[in-house]
Image (tube, helix red, strand yellow):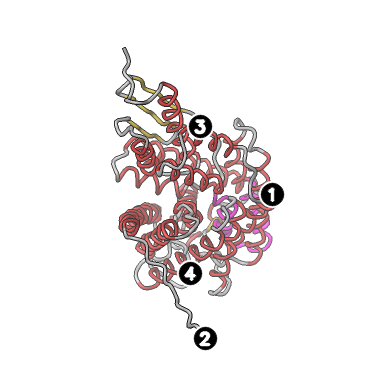
Amino acid sequence: MDQQPDGASPDDIDDLEEFILSLGRAQLAGGYPVDDVTRSLHAVAEAHGRPDLGIYVLPNAVLLDDPVIGRARIIAENPKVLRMDQAAAVHDIARDAREGHITPEQGLDELDDLRERDPRFPPWATILGRGLAAAGFALVFRVSFWGVGMAFLGGVFVGLLTYFTRRYPAVQPLVPPLAAAVCAFAVFGFGSIIDDSVQPLRVVAAPIITLIPGAAITRATQELASGHIISGASRLVASVVQILVLTFGVLVGGLLASVSPYDIGDLTEQRLPLGIAWVGAAIYAAGQVLAFNEPRGAVTPVILLLLLAFSVQQLVSWLLDAVIAAGVAAAVGLFVAIVIQDRSKRGTPAFVLFTPVFWLLVPGSLGLVALTEVVTGTADDPKAQATSADAPASPTLTSSLPSFDDLSVDTNASVLLVFAASIIAITIGMQIASLAGRMVQRLPDLPTPTFRTRRRG
């Protein structure tokens, strides 16, 4: 006969288990790493007197084993991806559950209401946000003004495509290759009229930057390093396949535009002024806020955090090396996000604040550029290298990340090596920031200063 925990009715047990499973599913849909989901669910179970529950989390599944009543339950499905404002609300629900402010039944009701919550910004604003993010990303790399304009239009197209296919799950897998092909065709075709020397891949990457799984690759590496082999390996394979799909779309777009492989390059020689990169970073941040419905109170921190991380990345890249700079910038950005989460009144989740930084610091675009050059043989083509012969020489590693130098590599292996090294550097930086952030979270709150007013008379 099944046993029951002391003082708990069958309904209470069912509600707690259902709440833990639903909370885990919501956290995964919100983009939480597997480590964070596992720790959060264990904390909720312990807060409700069930530290004995066995909880196992995969990228698309949550398993729960109750040893007392001898029952195992699982939620294995692909839920709808949550917006940033919804992901922040999931964080609040988990925190209230850990602190005992809500019951499992109340938590289930809040999770059900969360999925029906209207987005913070209207559809036209989120579509415009994707265009602004793409234009800002192009400005960061100081491409020509026609490239910025093409990136903006491509971003708006990707926003429209994403919006009108959101209710058709069967069609959504076709969005990345179609978006990549259309953007590549437009950029390469129009670029051949404006600049017949080199077609910039960065302009193609800008509109589809949010479709490039740079953050997923870093998260997969982080999970592999922490011992989550199944989660990390599956996420890594899925990310690599996504980059391959995007690369295929770029190549199809280039063929439709009748662009030769040696005409595909990373950046043209004519670049915008140096200071325009920070303007681009601010525009990129504002676009990300609109496109992904950042929650209230997170707009200013997101913009300041992205500018801070970008400035640190550029400074360290100039002083030392771009690969090291990526890791240092990721560490600084994530640590500041954790401090804001722990010390601010709203307590906006750190990953919500840090996610927009991923697409700028994580060299996902570099992976797309590298793979495209590997497939087309651009990196080894002497005619392709001749197009940048007049460009100033720069070290290979320093020029292979979002920096102010041209991307010029001698071999296919070197650009892929830089891509892998950058991912590892960012992973190490994030791990250091997580450890430092836990130390900050354990510190007592600073006392609120009181000021005495001098009485008159």
First-in-chain label (2 vs 1): 1
Q: Nearer the viewer, mark 1 or mark 3?
A: 1
**Residue 112 left/right relative to 164:** left
Query: What residue appears at the point 47 percent right and 44 percent down from the top-left corner?
Result: 31
Name the residue: 39% across, 52% down: 416
The three-letter amino acid code for the residue at tag 4 is Phe
Residue at numbered disc 2: 456
- Give the residues in magenta: 182-210
**Disc number lying in front (2 or 3):** 2
Q: Tag 2: residue type?
A: Arg
Pick the quarter of the image with the N terminus. top left
Q: Dot 3 surroundings within 10 Å: few (below 14), some, or many (20 or more)? A: few
Q: Return the residue at label 3.
A: 78
Counting from the top left corner in percent of width and height, residue 413 is at 37, 52
Which of pointers 2 and 1 indicates the residue nearer the eye?
2
Label 3 is placed on what type of residue? Asn
